Image: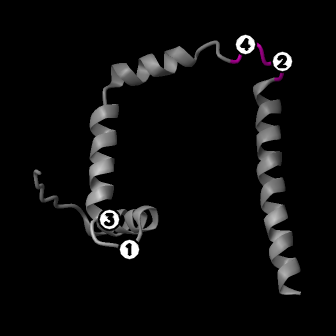
Amino acid sequence: MGEIKIVMPDDLERVFRKVAMKRFGFRKGSMSEAAREAIENWSIGGDNADEQEDSWNSLEGCMKHVKKSSVQLQHEAWNSVIEKHSKKSRKKYANRH
């Protein structure tokens, strides 16, 4: 198995450690798992602008069947987010009292 030493800014390291521990837990090897997954996703997914453009172009026309405007869809999306969070807030408040 290969080994890579990576040097990065302190703030990026803190964020990476926090996310890694949250995803993989506070156990031996979780940092290696997180780094492997991140590198794998980046390597396989690539950072090629042509691939990203092709991916975007493949989405073109996907929602032609939808009869609502983009503004209506945005309002529906935000309303569902607001409703979801207001339910959580009400539950927290009810549990306190």
- Give whichever of discs 1 and 2 has the lower sequence position: 1
Gap between marks 1 and 2 measured at Cα? 48 Å
Label drawn at residue 30: 3
Looking at the magenta stretch, what is its main secondary structure? loop
In the rendered image, the quadrant that contains the C terminus is bottom right
Q: Secondary structure at mark 4?
A: loop
Q: Are marks 3 and 1 in contact (CB under 8 Å)?
A: yes
Gap between marks 2 and 4 measured at Cα? 8 Å
Most foreground residue, 23 or 89: 23
- Give whichever of discs 1 and 4 has the lower sequence position: 1
Label drawn at residue 67: 2
Answer whether residue 66 is magenta in the image.
yes
Residue 67: where, in percent of width, then height? 83, 18
Residue 76: where, in percent of width, then height? 82, 39
Query: Mark 1 belongs to which amino acid?
Result: Phe
In the image, what residue occupies the spot 30% across and 57% down? 33
Gap between marks 1 and 4 measured at Cα? 46 Å
